[in-house]
Image: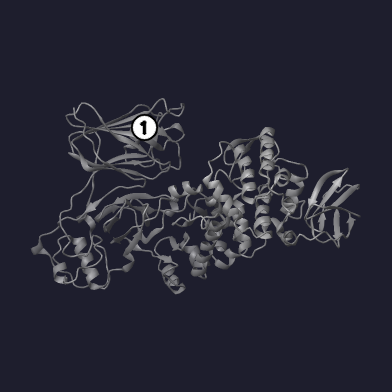
Amino acid sequence: MKKTFLTLTLTFTATIFLMSGSCSTDKDDIQIEEPADFYTPGDAEGIAQDIQVFIKSATASENQPGEDILKALDGDYSTIYHSRWNQTLFPEVPVVIEFIFDNEPDVIDYMLYHPRKDGGVNGFILSMDVFTRSEGQDEYYELGTFDFSANSSTRRITFSNGFNNPAGIKLVINEGYNDFVSASQFEFFQFSEQVESYADYFTDLSFSEIKEGVGREQLGLIENDFIRNMALAIYDGVYEEERIGDYSTYPDPAIISAENKTNRMGSYDNMTGIYVKAGEDVVVFVDEIKAELVLRIVDHYDGYGGQDFFLNPGPNRITSPVNGLIYLIYHADHNHHTKVNIASGEINGYFDLSMHTNEDWDKMIANAVCDFFDLKGEKSHITFTTNELKQYVTDATRLVEVYDSIVLLQQELMGLYKYDRVPDGRLYYRTNTSPGVYMHATGNATEYAPSTLIHIANHASLRGDHIWGPAHETGHIHQTRPGLMWIGLTEVTVNIYSQHVQTSFGNASRLQTENISGYSNRYEKAFSEIIAPGLAHGAHDDVFCKLVPFWQLQLYFAKAHDYNDFYKDLHEQIRVNPDPPTDGHCQIEFVKTVVQVAQKDLTEFFEAWGFLTPIDIDINDYGTRRLTVTQQQIDETKAWITQQGYPEPSGVVQYITDATVNIFQTGNSVVEGSGSRSGDLLNMTGWQNVAAFEVYHKDELFFISSLHTFSVPALPSNIKVVAVGVDGSRYNVEL
């Protein structure tokens, strides 16, 4: 038997219905409406929806009890099909799912695979073979193998010429996330048919502009009630311009994040400012498109995700399942634009930094109809709760500029500008109203409790004492992994970016000024608890102490020695080099990469901070993994550094702090002074150009401070203090 192949168009977003126009009345019965003072959407029943095709039966080769294949065919997106929990499936055992159809209808135009929407990730289908069988055929014929990324976006498989006389579709799933298979729903559809042509009335398929020469009487003869009502409103000048937009494509954030080895930017750059209610028909007119265009309705009370609907050129009708704001997701590798006209729903509006003023903001936020409101900057997208925005925003323009600056500063530090890697999208900041939330980052957004907006929705407060929170969560999106985020560093290296933003805004360094029990600041604690006892870096449990050596590299090379591109070049090397196979290898490769980028022999620095100290422990860091660095790896790394022939740095890099950058710049010799003791308090008087004071008891180093006055808890009676110069020279302090 000859094989019949169907062409599939595969996308990685979500969908449901396509729409079209239809005749609704006899032309002789049409009464042309008088001009109205404002636009009110008409009855959308005359705009047809796609026809869902239901299966006759379905089987799966296996399932977890209570999560059989019918759970993915019941129309309930909260239930799931799931393979058995107690086995490893792949690659030996593919899961086979078969759908059987009866004689109705005679064609299927596309199918949808909805991954689970419950927040879980197990079972996302990553690779499957698709087979089809038509009526009268005894066997299935393979269409191809299709690979997906691990996320919850709905996939649409379109049969370009229609799958005629369908008898069955079989999915052979060869790979699933974490070796499971799951699905929220599988659905099948037939396109509706366009009945009435509107080319004589409108300039394009967005139906947003009346053709020149077309009069009101001619528009009044349009048979479709909804389209006639809209056309007359456009002609009469009462149709709101906020309903019509020119929308651009953006690269898929998942692709960009993989290239840059980061988390994902947001997906909602094409905000519309239209709010719809559950059960309401949404009519959307779309001009020609160059890629899949998805309309997503987001109920922000329910989280980041939403309900997705694929759009086709011309009229589309959707029945909204939720209350929410509409966003358009238009991903493509090349830049395209399309015009979209959303002819129903309420206008909530959104603030665009490139278009609007603070006066516009005052009007917009006062007239908002949704509990959430969008603000759009060049680098940032903000969706905060409307009530808090009304209370705390005093200057919307400055607020968006601060968020843009947070993103800009971090992307510059990462070298995304230097190496032409800047993503076109925006970093997403949104309110999460769930109980127990404070601030956190997800895979593609940063989220904040409404209670935090008193500080982070006010530009003056944000750019001052409260810059750390959003800068920290933004850093989680930008963290370069795994080369700068091996086990134990999730809450460590993120703060390279936080520190950079905080100090760039003119705020004091948190490492320098934050008081810690028993210590004057974080530097003192890190020096005394990691360097003094010779502890392995990964064995310490204070994320800020572990941050110190990473920030010192920025202080020494960029601040003290004007190598402003240090972290830019370091990030790029991590991006272009292969990912190390283990966390321990990541730590070793980091040492080597820093040495190569700086072209300095930093053996002493990395020994002092415990990067070149053996370790073999389990670390719980949002999941537990083992960090192992062996003595053999250390010896080989030190030998490799020696072979490079790089000079040692001119200063003791392990002792630089925000407050001592200036003496590392000048490199002046130590000017000796005196010292005194009062109980646990040590006071160093007259000393200049000292990088650190080391405190010894019985010749054992146990406390280090870069300050000239500091307390040592339970300070023994018999101590020795040594002043360390920038060049590593040492001087005994007479107490």
SS class, disc 1: strand
**Residue 623 picture location, percent across and down:** 57, 38
Q: Quadrant of residue 271?
A: bottom left
Q: Quadrant of the N terminus?
A: top left
249 vs 512, nearest the viewer? 249
Q: Quadrant of the C terminus?
A: bottom right
Please indicate, yes or no, whether residue 581 appears anywhere in the rendered image.
yes
Residue at 55% across, 62% down: 456
388 vs 374, nearest the viewer? 374
**Residue 47 picture location, percent across and down:** 21, 55
Chosen colour scheme: one colour
Type of amino acid under label 1: Ile
Q: Which residue is mark 1?
A: 173
Q: Quadrant of residue 453?
A: bottom right
**Residue 523 picture location, percent across and down:** 73, 53
Residue 658 lies left or right of residue 669; in this view the side is left
Up the image or down, 487 lies above or below 369; here it is above
Please indicate, yes or no, whether residue 487 appears anywhere in the rendered image.
no
Residue 283 lies left or right of residue 398; in this view the side is left
192 vs 354, nearest the viewer? 354
Q: Residue furthest left?
A: 28
Q: Quadrant of residue 650?
A: bottom right
